Amino acid sequence: MSLGAAESPPPSYSRKVQLLRLLGLSVMVGILGAMAVIAFHQLLLSLEAALYGSNQGLVADARHLPYEIRIVIPALDGLIAGLVLHCFLRNGKGGGRSGLHGSHQCG
C-alpha cells in the first residue's frame, strides 16, 4: 500500500516523546549550569582566601590595605580602561569629533 500525497509517514517518535526528551535535556543543562556557578563561586572564595588570607569579602579585605594602594590601584585601572577604549574603539561611529584623534596611532 503506497502513501498518498495527503498522508505523511509516521514519525519515529511522537511529539510528546520529543517534548519529554527536550524537557529532560533542559533540566540536565540547568543542573549542570547551577553546578558550574557553585564551582565558580567556590573557586573565587578559595582564590580570595589564598590572596588575602581571609574570605570576609573584598571590601573588608581592602580596608586592611594601605591608604595609598587604595587610591593608586583604581586610578591605574581607569587609565588602562581609557587606553584600551582609545585604542580599540577609535574607529567607532560615535557622536564625538573624530578629527581630533587622527594624529594618534595605537600599536
Image: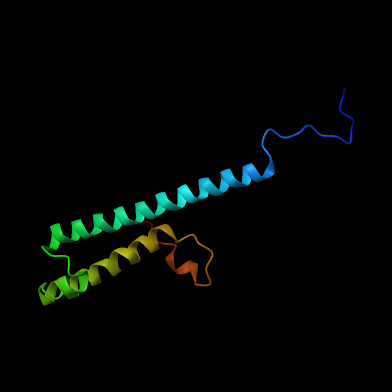
Rendered position, 91 above or below 59: above
- Quadrant in the picture for the N terminus: top right
Q: Which residue is depicted at the point 38% across and 57% down?
A: 105
Residue 68 coordinates in the image, percent (x, y): 12, 75
**Relative to 36, is 53 above or below?**
below
Of residue 60 and residue 6, the one placed in the foreground of this image is 6
| Residue sitting nearer the eye, 45 or 29 | 29
Q: In front here: 91 or 40?
A: 40
- Snapshot quadrant of residue 78: bottom left
**Residue 100 rendering spot, x and y as whole percentages:** 44, 69
Name the residue: 17% across, 65% down: 55
Left or right: residue 103 compared with residue 3: left
Query: In the rendered image, which quarter is residue 52 located in?
Result: bottom left
**Numbered marks: total:** 0
Q: Is residue 107 visible?
A: no
Instruction: Return the x and y of residue 79 as percentages of the image width and height.
Output: 28, 67
The residue sitting at 13% across, 65% down in the picture is 54
Which residue is at 44% across, 62% downward? 102
Residue 17 shows in the view? yes
